[in-house]
Structure formats: C-alpha cells, structure tokens
Image: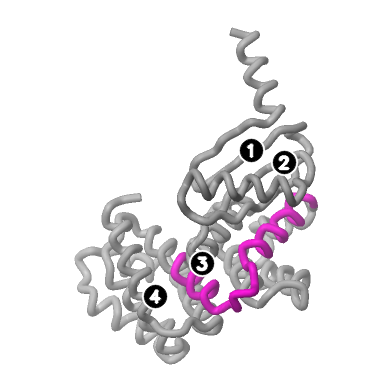
Amino acid sequence: MGSATREALAASRSALAEAGEPTLAAAEQLLGAGRAIGGSAQLRGVLADAEIAIERKQSLLDSIFGASLAPQAKGLLLGLVGRRWSRSDDLLEGIEEIGIRLAAGSAPASTAVDAELFAFLQAVIGDAELELALASKLATPETKAGVIAGLLEGKAHGTTIAILQHLVQQPRDRRIRPLIEAAADIVADQAGSEVATVTAAAPLSPAQRKRLEEGLTASRGRSFRVHVVIDPSILGGLRVKVGDEIVDGTVASRLQDLKLALAS
C-alpha cells in the first residue's frame, strides 16, 4: 500500500468517526456508488486523473449520485474522492472499506457480523456448487445478490447480508475466501478487535478456542475474535492467520516440508 493511500484511508476513517450515527441505508448507498464507479471505465478515468481538479470531480459525483445518497453517504463519498490515492484501484478499495465499516457500525452490539460472515464462508467452502455460482462471471451481479438474499434472509443480520451482497457483486478478481476474510477483518477492526482465522481439520472445543483467544490477546495486546474454518485436507494441527501473517502448524504442511527435504 502506497503512502498516499495510507494517508487517504486514515483521513477517511477519521471522517467516518465524525459522520454521526451510522445507518445501514447509508452504507448500502455508499457501497452501491462504489460499484457504479467500478463499473464505469470513463468515470474511473476521470476520478483517477490527477490533472482534474478535486472540485470538478466532486461536482461530477454530486450530479450523478447526489439525489440518491443520504447526506452521510454523500459526505463520505465526496471526501473519499477528494483525497489522493496511490493507485486508481485504491479508491474503490477505500470506498469499500468505509462502506463496510459504516455497515458494521450500524449493527447492534449484540450482533457478531464477523462471525456470521465466517459462518457463510464455511458454508461456501463446503458447497462447490454454491462457490461456483457466486464466483461465476456468467451470472449477473443482481443474480448473485439474489442468491445471498435467498440463503440468508431471516438467518443473518441485514448488515451481514448487505456486505456479502456487495462483495459478490463487485469481487474485482478476488476469490470468495479472501474476499470474505478481508471483510471480516474490517468489521472486527471497526469494533476494536482483531480476527484470527484458524483452519483446523475438525471443530475446536470451547476450551481450545478460549486458550487461543487468550494467547493471542496476551501476545498482541488487543482483543481477538477466533473464527474456525474446517478443512479435513490439512489432516491435523492448526493454521493460524492474522492479517497477512500465517503460522502453519498443520500436518499437511509438515508432510510437504518432509517431501521437499527428501527430494533435495
């Protein structure tokens, strides 16, 4: 991530904190605007052109989206566009992150949106047809959003559904697993926690999960939420992923290391 994007994201998060009480409607509008921008090469080109004045870009977006956006969503979008980004694609990532944070902030404190995201991810991993349907480039974005709604209406919070619908409508060449994991990281961070994605061959007991959370919290100085992904192919052991850091203690990984050592 370039320095300009880091500064733009930091400023955008600060703007979000000052934008008032988050609403899911504003979050959906902001994410929808991001999809519209991502779907227009001409619009992306204008917004990425450093020679075009910020005021002109903001005026253009106001003419396109102004009537359809709530003041909260409009203010955040204009702020995002008014900042410098290291790459043109970083603007889309910035809109997505702020939209997800806004959605997460609108959910009741009792709702674990990141846990619901991981529960859906586990369902996708265990259903090849579902994963194919959500990843297919032949299906329209609206069809994919409909699949999410059909599966989760009445079973997951509206915030979770809105985030997933956005992700499948604008994956930007990202696979479904890292797509959802990244969104869960953002949701947890907005709540002041961090996510550890633990891949195991079988479900962890409550005591095992608690020991992992306590160990990570003690070593990192920040509260952790542990989410477990079941993958029998690892045979045994655990793979722990925190952000970009991965500690792989799986049996499958050790066997692979042994094969490489014997072959050398």
- The quadrant holding residue 257 is top right
Question: Is 149 displayed left or right of 38 in the figure?
Answer: right
**Residue 205 or residue 83, whichever sits in front:** 205
Cα separation between marks 2 and 4: 36 Å
Q: Quadrant of the C terminus?
A: top right
Disc 1 residue crowd, few under 14, some 14–19, many 20+, Cα 10 Å: many
* CB atoms of marks 1 and 2 within 8 Å: yes
- The quadrant holding residue 252 is top right
Which residue occupies 65% across, 67% down? 140
Please report whichever mark, 4 or 1, sits nearer to the chain's N-terminal start.
Answer: 4
Q: Looking at numbered disc 1 in the image, what kind of residue is underneath it?
A: Arg
Please report whichever mark, 3 or 2, sits nearer to the chain's N-terminal start.
Answer: 3
Q: Which residues are magenta?
A: 97-126
Cα separation between marks 1 and 2: 7 Å
Residue ID for mark 3: 191
Cα separation between marks 3 and 1: 24 Å
Residue ID for mark 4: 16
Task: Check disc 4 and report its element: helix, strand or loop.
Answer: helix
Residue ID for mark 1: 239
